[in-house]
Image (cartoon, helix red, strand yellow):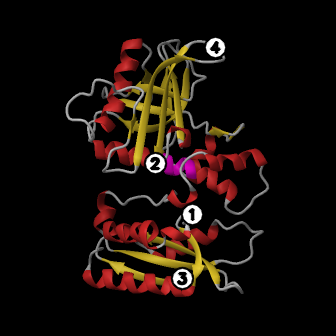
Amino acid sequence: MTSLTALESKRSIRSAARRLASHFADEIVAGVPTKLFGELWRPSNTDIWCLVDEPKPRKDTGSPHYWIGFGRGAGSWKKRIVQCDLPEEGKNRHYAAVFAKDGDGEIWLMHNGRISGGGATLPKDELERTYHHKRVDVEFSDGKSARYYPVVKLGVSNRKVYRSIRDFLDACQSVRLNKLQYRLPVSSKIDSFARYGSAPGDWFISKEPSGFEASRPAYCYILRFGTGNPDGNDTWKIGWTTHPIRRLGQINAHIPISIKGSWKKYFQARFPTATIAFDAEQKILREFLKDKLPRREQVICNEDTIRKVCKTLIKWSEDRKVE
């Protein structure tokens, strides 16, 4: 993606904000709703919700700005995962978000990557470790530019909008979890990031397969960490991949050197397409192991529970579908 141009007029910014809210409202209300702003839109065909609020004065400057919040599940706006503030008009690079136009005239919502909560703020470049989009330059009318992450392109299908926003939310949650997962020596303020977004049991960051990859044969795998705990409850990881050996190596490469142990393959089931393998992984995490409160595709439970999951995966693999 080449550089983009920021929208700065009050009319163009409001139009873009309405388009964003419409992608969510369209699935709930037939026709154009009388009130797009200030409503939390949660369509039934996605786990993502959106709230675009009317411009309100900032407490510190008094200048009007839009507040856009994204979250997932049944949470309220207070449990948002990402907050996007942008000015009602003009140029102000201190805000986290901006609407911008690319060379083809397409409108994008952009975010500078500054993820904050509970008084702590992560560096903007942290997001590049987990997000598949890199930052791009957004140019302003004063000749200056700033770097932002593309969040979502407006005007495409609602399904594509939800998928793009989900990818961004997953990346943001992954950055926060990376700070907490192995109890690394971080500020206690960063621990407060846990209050942003849904409860840990709702964090499923696996990326849905797309393009050519979606039709390739793939596996749903189960990994076990270490050699077993005395209490019988081990840590397990459920995921999907088109290359199990390579994937196992990638996962083990990210274990901090201060942690003893490694992931080992416990089970894998082959599926005719990556899409089916992804569906199997999601159903196992969201339904079969929901009471185990999965975090980043990981659960803590006994081996008997996992054996039941293996039997289910074998059946789905034989039937070539997920029921």
The answer for how far apart the CA atoms under marks 2 and 3 are is 31 Å
Disc 1 to disc 2, how far (Cα)?
15 Å
Q: Is residue 79 visible?
A: yes
Image mark for residue 61: 4
SS class of the residue under badge 3? strand
Whether pointer 2 and pointer 4 mark residues with C-beta atoms closer than 8 Å, the reply is no
* In-image side of 228 versus 299 (left or right): right
Amino acid beneath label 2: Arg
Task: Please state which amino acid type lies under the numbered disc 3.
Answer: Lys
Instruction: Give the spatial CA distance, label 1 vs label 4.
Output: 39 Å
Q: Tell me where residue 26 appears, x and y as whole percent.
A: 26, 36
Name the amino acid, label 4. Answer: Thr
Quadrant assignment, res 62 = top right
The nearer-to-camera label among 3 and 4 is: 4
- The numbered disc on residue 90 is none
- Which of the image's four quarters has the C terminus? bottom left
> Along the polypeptide, which appears first: circle 1 or circle 3?
3
Q: Which residue is mark 1?
A: 295
The quadrant in which the N terminus is found is top left
Above or below — where is 116 with respect to 194? above
Q: Position of residue 40 (x, y in %)?
A: 41, 36
Q: Which residue is mark 3?
A: 265
Q: Magenta span covers which residues?
A: 169-173
Alpha carbons under labels 2 and 4: distance apart: 30 Å
